[in-house]
Amino acid sequence: MEADVNAGCAWGGGGSVGLLAEFRTWLDRERGLSPVSVRCYSKQAKGFLAAVGGPGAVSDLDAAKVTAFMVDYSRDRNTWSAKAMVTSLRAFLRFAHVTGRTAVPLAGAVPAVASWRLSALPRGLPAAEIELLLAGCDQNTATGLRDYAVLSLLARLGLRGAEAAALQLSDIDWRAGEIAVTGKGSRTERLPLPVLAGKALAAWLSGGRPACESRAVFVTVRRPYRQLTPEAVRAVMGRACDRAGLERRGAHRLRHALATEMLRAGASLPEVGQVLRHRSQLSTSLYAKVDQDALRPLARPWPGVGW
């Protein structure tokens, strides 16, 4: 059925394939999104096109159809899955409008997903579990040195998995003790390199990383030597969980753990946002959510009221 839809559409020279390719190019060149985000947005847009009848149906879209799609899509999905579609669909509809495929802007017709609830609290990892993850890396092997360095950057510096995968040798300034990180929107920022993370990096580069043409910091340890992908970084985290005897968790949990630990140590939300390189204070405000059990020990009785 999808093949029939594609065959009957001339947009982009290849139906859904051509339209999505143009969308990916727009995300990369106009929005400056990372390759991981581009793939995610494109995948979500592909699902949307299949649901509404293919690229040929885009010109007939209206606010009611867009809203109806999101309501139906979100019915049996969790909050994070629904939010991913909201973000991707808004981007696709902006693209459709600026390229003349829709007469009116429809991004505003995509309803927001309510998520201000306890179940949506950022979930970090206890310090003891992080130490188990790190301790499980066999630093007598090249793979262990690499995985230890990857996990150290995620845990000590709060890097995203894609950011760790994208690091280049030229991004490390040993003399200044800094590292250049290219994050969302292709923004590059220089961060101080924590001592423990720096030692882990030095050990990998001097005693584990194979000599190869790639200028990436993290590469495979077997031929042909290739730069690690964001998926490979997630696999590093998964194997570390297995070795530590823990349930598999995402690499982002280490980023959440760093933010939580900073708040417990007295850091302000703006300071946390600066370390995590959030572009919006709304992103950091997520960490302002705390459950009642965490607040209860800090609560003080109202004057004149006996508890």
Image (tube, rainbow, N blue to C red):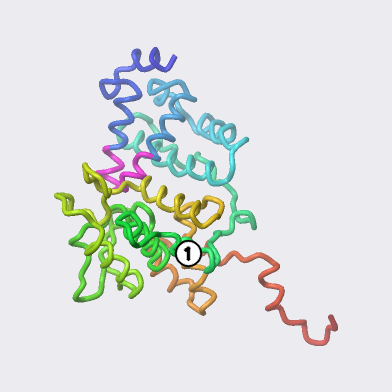
For the C terminus, the image quarter is bottom right
At mark 1, the secondary structure is helix
Q: Position of residue 301 (x, y in %)?
A: 77, 82
- Left/right of residue 89 with respect to residue 20 in the rendered view: right
Q: Residue furthest bottom?
A: 304
Residue closest to the eye, 236 or 210: 210
For the N terminus, the image quarter is top left
Residue closest to the eye, 228 or 135: 135
- Left/right of residue 89 with respect to residue 97 in the rendered view: right
Q: Residue at x 48, y 40 (%)?
A: 85
Q: Residue at x 28, y 61 (%)?
A: 181
- Left/right of residue 251 with respect to residue 19 in the rendered view: right
- Is 215 magenta? The answer is no
**Image height check: is 277 above or below 80?**
below
Q: Residues within 10 Å of mark 1 (few under 14, many from 20)?
A: some
Q: Amino acid at mark 1?
A: Thr
* Total tally of numbered discs in the picture: 1
Label 1, on which residue? Answer: 284
Q: Position of residue 182 (x, y in %)?
A: 28, 58
The main secondary structure of the magenta stretch is helix
- Is 35 magenta? The answer is yes
Q: Quadrant of residue 288?
A: bottom right
**Image height check: is 175 above or below 15?**
below
Q: Residue at x 41, y 26 (%)?
A: 58
Residue closest to the eye, 120 or 73: 120
Q: Position of residue 74 (x, y in %)?
A: 58, 37
Q: Position of residue 93 (x, y in %)?
A: 40, 36
Q: Residue furthest front?
A: 140
**Image height check: is 81 above or below 257?**
above
Q: Residue at x 23, y 57 (%)?
A: 209
Q: Which residues are magenta?
A: 25-39
